[in-house]
Amino acid sequence: MIYAVYIINKAGGLIYNEQFNVNKQVEETTFSQFPLPLVMSVDGSRVVVKFGELGRVKPGFSVISIDKSPVNGTYTSSGKPIIDVINDPNSYPLTVSFGRGKIGANEKLMLASTFHSLYAISSKISPVEQSSGIKMMETEEFVLHCFQTITGVKFFIIVDHKQTACEPLLHRIYQLYTDFVLKNPFYLIDMPIRCELFDQNLKRVIEQVERANVYNSATLS
């Protein structure tokens, strides 16, 4: 499963991001009594788990629905702040659905800048001269794969542990970038990418990858 695609320019600025499979991993729990055994906080346009774990719900998960009704940002469907509902003993029993919702624009920019810095640091501390930097980072929940072009543009994807052959996928995304972005006469180098053809073809490639759960360049047209 592919969660996200990021493109960072040579200066460390985020110029493209697309998230996939948002809220496909949903965990619904009914809490019989106050307080909630998780520490929640408002993070931009979401209410997220800050500390604590409950089953598969971990820090970073956000509230998707309250009592079966989808939330609207940091508010319930009835317009009440989610934090107030969670912190009100009279709200219990309370059914809450958690998932990995889309991250906000500020979070994306911070993530891109942080990874760019880590990439540069890893290149400098490497005992091998002219190290390429980070190519893969692995956690319990996901794996990050990165490919940097000779011009310093970084492409990285975030996938689950079952996704295979991610390096060829990164090269395919780079090919789409050269075909539909760099060849666009209206595109300015290192600026945010707004190209409908790139979006469409990237989505098509991602869908093909996920149907097969393995990327093989010979299978894509």
Image (cartoon, helix red, strand yellow):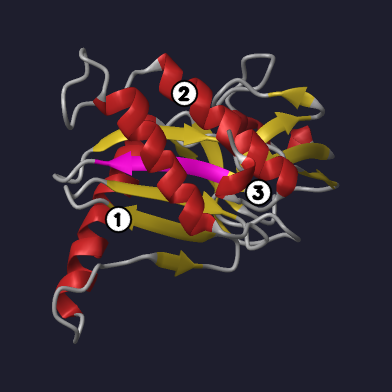
Give the residue number, with chain letter if any, for mark 1: 115
Mark before the other along the chain sequence, 1 or 2: 1
Q: CA distance from mark 3 to mark 2?
A: 18 Å
Give the residue number, with chain letter if any, for mark 2: 199
The percent position of residue 169, horizontal first and vertical second, equals 50, 49
Name the residue: 42% across, 66% down.
Answer: 136
The three-letter code of the residue at mark 1 reads Phe
Closest to the observer, 218 or 32: 218
Mark 2 element type: helix
Name the residue: 84% across, 39% down.
Answer: 93
Badge 3 density bin: few <14, some 14–19, many ≥20, Cα 10 Å: many
Q: In front of the other: label 3 or label 2?
A: 2
Name the residue: 25% across, 63% down.
Answer: 118
Badge 1 density bin: few <14, some 14–19, many ≥20, Cα 10 Å: some
To which quarter of the image does residue 207 belong?
Answer: top right
Closest to the observer, 29 or 12: 12
Mark before the other along the chain sequence, 3 or 1: 3
The three-letter code of the residue at mark 3 reads Met
Mark before the other along the chain sequence, 3 or 2: 3
Lateral position of residue 206 relative to residue 121, left or right: right
Closest to the observer, 133 or 108: 133
Give the residue number, with chain letter if any, for mark 3: 1
To which quarter of the image does residue 141 belong?
Answer: bottom right
Q: Is residue 201 magenta?
A: no
Q: CA distance from mark 1 to mark 2?
A: 23 Å
The percent position of residue 166, horizontal first and vertical second, equals 52, 56
Residues shaded magenta? 3-8
Closest to the observer, 117 or 129: 129
Badge 2 density bin: few <14, some 14–19, many ≥20, Cα 10 Å: some
Mark 1 element type: helix
The percent position of residue 71, horizontal first and vertical second, equals 66, 24
Residue 177 makes an appearance in the image: yes
